């Protein structure tokens, strides 16, 4: 019996690998969206952006599709950069510089990674959406070189930054992991799969 196909609506190989690992035990073939496809994130919420990506990719690939949108929300910055996290600055280095500069010396550095994930059927109809939040705080300098916001985001429960979480910790504590755990049973049910 051929395993059902699931497309992850992303061209980012890291994100695809991360979501695939989160769905690891499910008997699925996983692929990423077509190479030249670039869905513009014109929504005003994570859910709108995830739906735009999920519905477009599902309609093109004619396969079950998972899409997500996520961002970093900093309390002292009234929830910014939020849905604009990916477009906050040109490079990772500039993003870090910009957020640290905006925070200045404030001791109030609480923040959260917020993810919304959607499951669409092969016709592009949304079947289920789920949300995940990982709470933490921003350090005054990145914990390692070459990272993005995840190198600044301290997860107290794990005693490390988000970027240093293991795959197991990402599934349990990570915002995308929490959303994926909520989506998985619906995916199983819709595809008639058992683990």
Image: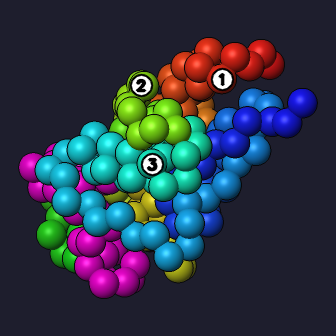
Q: Nearer the viewer, mark 3 or mark 2?
A: 3
For this view, does 77 lie left or right of residue 178? left
Residue where numbered disc 1 is placed: 191
Callout 2: SS: strand
Residue 177, quarter of the rendered image? top right
Name the one closer to the observer, 71 or 77. Answer: 71
Q: Is residue 162 visible?
A: no
Name the one closer to the observer, 142 or 118. Answer: 118
Q: Which residues are magenta?
A: 70-96
| Lower position in the chain sequence, tag 1 or tag 2 | 2
Q: Does residue 79 belong to the magenta stretch?
A: yes
Residue where numbered disc 2 is placed: 128
Residue where numbered disc 3 is placed: 59
- The residue under the point 39% across, 33% down is 125
| Lower position in the chain sequence, tag 3 or tag 1 | 3
Q: Nearer the viewer, mark 3 or mark 1?
A: 3
Rendered position, 74 above or below 144: above
Residue 46, quarter of the rendered image? top left
Q: Residue 134 at what x, y percent from top left? A: 41, 38
Q: Does residue 143 belong to the magenta stretch?
A: no
Rendered position, 52 above or below 12: above
Q: Residue 71 at what x, y percent from top left? A: 32, 53
Decide: marks 3, 2 in contact (CB < 8 A)? Answer: no
Question: Gap in Å between the C-alphas at discs 3 and 2?
Answer: 16 Å
Q: Nearer the viewer, mark 1 or mark 2?
A: 1
Question: Gap in Å between the C-alphas at discs 1 and 2?
Answer: 13 Å
């Amino acid at each position: 019996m051929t395993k059902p196909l699931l497309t992850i609506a992303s061209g980012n190989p890291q994100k695809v690998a991360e979501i695939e690992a989160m769905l690891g035990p499910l008997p699925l073939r996983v692929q990423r969206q077509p190479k030249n496809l670039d869905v513009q994130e014109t929504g005003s919420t994570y859910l709108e952006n995830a739906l735009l990506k999920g519905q477009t990719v599902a309609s093109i690939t004619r396969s079950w599709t998972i899409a997500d949108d996520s961002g970093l929300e900093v309390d002292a910055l009234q929830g910014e950069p939020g849905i604009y996290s990916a477009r906050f600055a040109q490079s990772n280095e500039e993003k870090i510089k910009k957020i640290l500069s905006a925070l200045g010396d404030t001791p109030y550095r609480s923040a959260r990674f917020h993810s919304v994930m959607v499951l669409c059927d092969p016709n592009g109809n949304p079947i289920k959406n789920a949300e995940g939040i990982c709470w933490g705080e921003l350090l005054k300098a990145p914990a390692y070189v070459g990272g993005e916001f995840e190198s600044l985001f301290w997860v107290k429960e794990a005693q490390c930054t988000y970027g240093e979480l293991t795959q197991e910790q990402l599934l349990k504590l990570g915002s995308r992991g929490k959303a994926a755990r909520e989506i998985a049973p619906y995916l199983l049910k819709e595809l008639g799969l058992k683990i």
